[in-house]
Amino acid sequence: MIKAAVITTLLMTTRAQSNKTVARWGTEPIKMSHIYDENLMPSFFFMAGGEEGGSYTPPSGGYAGGLGDPRPFSPPDSCPDELFNHTMKDLRVPVLPYLEQDDWGCEAKGAKPSAVPVIEIENDYLRGAITPQWGGKVWSMYDKTHKEQLFFNNPAHQPENIAYRKAWTSGGCEWNWGAGYIGHSVFTESATFSAKMPTEYGDVVRVWEFDRINSTVWQVDILLDEDVFWAHARVTNPHKEEQNGYWWTCVAMPVTETSRIITPAKISITPCTAWPYGAHTEPNVTFRGAPVDGCDAQPGAPHDPHCAWQQDMSWLGNIPGPHDFFFHKTAPEAHFELPYIVHAREDGWSVVHSHPLEGTKFFTWGAGMFGQFQQDFMSASDYENEKCRQSYTDKNRTWELIYSMHALDCLP
């Protein structure tokens, strides 16, 4: 655990507050789909390919379960040499000692919001809602001055088969730590410990848990400093040997085709290609035409809009399908000292996420029908297309076509 002296150091680095933050029990209006009993039949090695990250053995992909030799993470050959250091030694991790959460309902669609218990954390500028029952996720963070949510405040708790233990819900700001496995935290839909710590600057909320897969403890201290939301994460490793793992703070944002991601990066891994002109597995996204009429010598070159077309992946509407963009931090003189990523809206509202880790990333569902369906489903959207000729799916179709049902059965 963090000692008091360390907490004092953390808080002293923030600006002096004109008001103190208060933490208390409260409620948040959420349309609920419930998770039921955990599955007593666990996932084993031979089933690992069906879990999030279980089939991730780059660069070729494929089945990652079974016995035999360890299967370490292997970056593509096109990546910088430093990416091959500190990689996970074996990705074949069964769910045990945890049980799968693969039984949930879809009651949220069409339902009225329920008053869900949360920890409220509030000052004169921000009001947050923390759900210790769901991994300590910050479900919402409302800017009272601008009357805007800092990130996607999902109106529904609708699980989907996405996390390491299957059940996962979108929205909010969640904490993920994994040493030896890839995927959303085993706690994403499970309860964590939580505590209120009074300080001279106001209340700090701490959420934490012990991970039985790797015998480590993770914790996050949450603080509001005027209009800035601070989160201080820490992992305690009781082992003599080092554990190579992956920490990620997953912040959901509502997006449109004109939303843009701004980050001072030059490459994105998986695969390692130039950012923003590339960094995707779809064909031809790295294509760039000839420098017509010497446009590459004009101001703003080589990315002048008058040059021949090239797909700019920083505009989310240009990304066709689901994909992770991992931005690698290289030499400071050629890159950036402190990684950050900005989500910018067309109206100018922007949210900045900055941290001291080795890189930053974002995931998008993409502009295709599959991603649209996933987002609509997990937010219990009541949207209906009046041009659809049928409101049901054909059980004989493949799952890819089922997710594209409204593309196949709806008129232009």
Image (cartoon, rainbow, N blue to C red):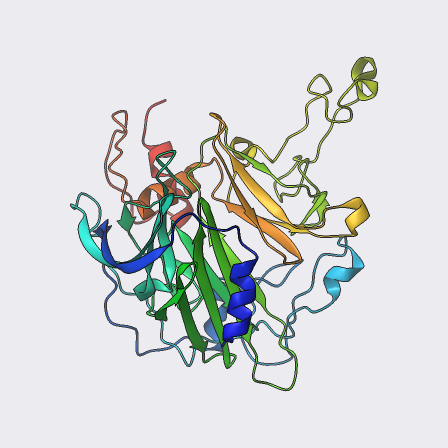
- Count the labels in the image: 0
- Residue toward you, 297 or 308: 297
Residue at horizontal 23 percent and vertical 56 percent from the top: 26
**Residue 296 image-quadrant placement:** top right
Position of residue 236 measured from the top left corner of the image (x, y, whole percent) = 54, 77
Q: Which of 70 and 237 is in front in this view?
A: 237
Q: Position of residue 399 (x, y in %)?
A: 39, 49
Question: Could you say which is closer to the camera, residue 191 or residue 65?
Answer: 191
Image location of residue 209, percent across then percent down: 42, 74
Residue 53 makes an appearance in the image = no
Residue 331 seen: yes
Residue at image x 58%, y 65%? 246
Name the side, left or right, on which 404 lies relative to 216. left
Would residue 71 be found to the left or right of residue 46 on screen?
Answer: right
Q: Nearest the camera: 239 or 37?
A: 239
* Residue 9: percent from left, percent from top: 56, 65
Image height of 164 relative to 353, above or below: below
Residue found at the very far top of the displayed protein: 293
Residue at x 68% of width, y 35% of height: 277
Is 53 on the left or on the right of 147, as rendered? right
The residue under the point 51% across, 60% down is 11
To which quarter of the image does residue 88 belong? bottom right
Q: Quadrant of the C terminus?
A: top left
Seen from this angle, which residue lies furthest bottom? 240
